[in-house]
Image: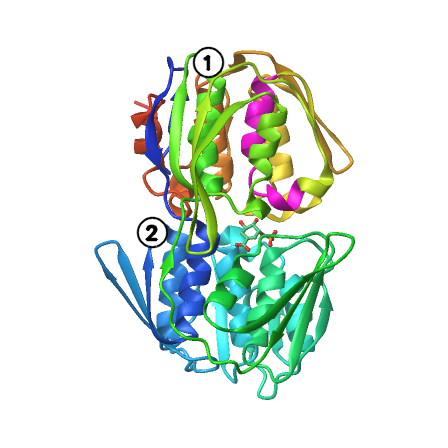
Amino acid sequence: MRKLVSRSAPALTGSVAVPGDKSISHRALMIGASAVGKTEIRGLLEGEDVLCTAAALREFGARIEQQGDVWSVTGVGVGGFSQPENIIDVGNAGTAARLLMGLLASQDLKVYFTGDASLRSRPMNRVIEPLSKMGAAFDAREGGRMPLTLHGACEPIPINYDLPMPSAQVKSAVLLAALNTPGTTTVTEREATRDHTENMLRSFGASIEVSIMHDGGRKIAVSGFAEMIATNVMVPGDPSSAAYPGVAALIVPGSEVTVENVGMNPLRAGLFETLREMGADLTLTRRRFSAGEQVADITFRHGPLTGVDIPAARAPTMIDEYPIVAVAAAVAKGETRMRGLAELRLKESDRFLAILEGLTASGVAVKADGDDIVIQGCGGLLEGGSEIAVNLDHRVAMSFLVLGVAAQQPISIDDAAAIGTSFPGFVELMNGIGMQISEQKFETGA
Ligand code: S3P
């Protein structure tokens, strides 16, 4: 295991571009593979999660090639996947697993899925349930866990599905299954979740209608068998990745860091709203639309941060950002309450527990209150001196490395491997703005 250690550092400065958005990258490959013709993708995240999706789609017959920074996908058309020869191993990638199951659920194929230890422990029942209603059958381990076998439906059935939890992955699985299903399938979500699937299906020519309900929820209707036509995609920088250099700059005195070309989809932007409420100095410049998604450059400047109360209703728009918000809260002055975090227990690791244990070990007062986490900020440097168990979770690894820059004693993580799933080049980029992250060599006994 590669251990890393992060130490306090003087002011961070620079202008950086983070890798492409993970959610959009998965979708560009999958929807490109289901369209007719050749889709070119620029800015694709070349992280392990997305490479697993590319490898799986090749198994289903799509041609995917890389030339420089352009990825091209020659699609097989809706419903055109072929029977894979191999077991589909999607590594650490929950999005790959759940969205691919959706795509396959309405195609008459038998597919064996597995993943790494983290993914094998995560619940797949949330997609098994609606996809079974559409006619697919699953043979899964206890609790709907992988490894599992999916038997796609020969005669898929359209459904009207009310999402029982705010999950863009479950919503997307049903919408992707609907592409090869006769009639109209609808998904209703009470709380709006990231809408990259809807945006991309629309731009590829799928038959999709989204209506906003009076309570802010959404109803999405997809009619099956519409032909999708290859469409080039420009993937913006991942706002979830921008959060790491951004928060690092906010908590180190004298810092100013710009992250260029960050996706600003409103359903992903809860972090920036929260940081502003904490008093963060963020400036957005070059606001523009790029391939249907809002994009901007963001400058993060250090300044005092204050604790805030983050409403549960905001969780879907910042669901992956709680570990890094917890870092900002640990350095801020006063109390931060992060509400409604039940879903955090089901991510790449139990992030609810990871925040509690990691902050406690680093000398920060933190407690659970039902599904809320309450953090007493240190109002400056915290103690540190902790070693964090990452448990195959990239966001836990990166967040605690950022925390190390605001700690009196270095903070280390036990395993850096997971970072490559979403943020290749993380250490180099962070050290490039002035952070001090280095390999921690194992002590060898005599
Ligand atoms: C994602 C949706 C979210 C998020 C994940 C990516 C997506 O998961 O946590 O990192 O691309 O649709 P849930 O759908 O489980 O909330």
Q: Amino acid at mark 2?
A: Gly
Instruction: Say how the picture is coloured.
Output: rainbow
Residue located at (51% from left, 15% from top): 303
Q: Quadrant of residue 5?
A: top left
| Image quarter of the C terminus | top left
Q: Which one is nearer the viewer's eye here, 196 or 145?
A: 196
**Could one spot residue 88 in this view of the protein?**
no
Element type at mark 1 = strand
**Could one spot residue 123 in this view of the protein?**
yes
Residue located at (58% from left, 28% from top): 275
Query: The magenta stretch spans which residues?
Result: 315-332
Say whether residue 18 is left or right of residue 404: left
* Residue 348 pos. (x, y %): 54, 47
* Residue 193 pos. (x, y %): 63, 52
Residue located at (59% from left, 41% from top): 318
Residue located at (38% from left, 52% from top): 48
Which mark is in front, 2 or 1? 2
Instruction: Look at the image and say whether residue 369 sits in the magenta stretch.
Output: no
Name the residue furthest bottom.
155
Disc 2 C-beta below 8 A from ligand 1 = no
Instruction: Look at the image and say whether residue 320 sits in the magenta stretch.
Output: yes
Reading the image, the residue beneath label 2 is 43
Element type at mark 2 = loop
| Secondary structure, magenta segment, majority class | helix
Reading the image, the residue beneath label 1 is 409
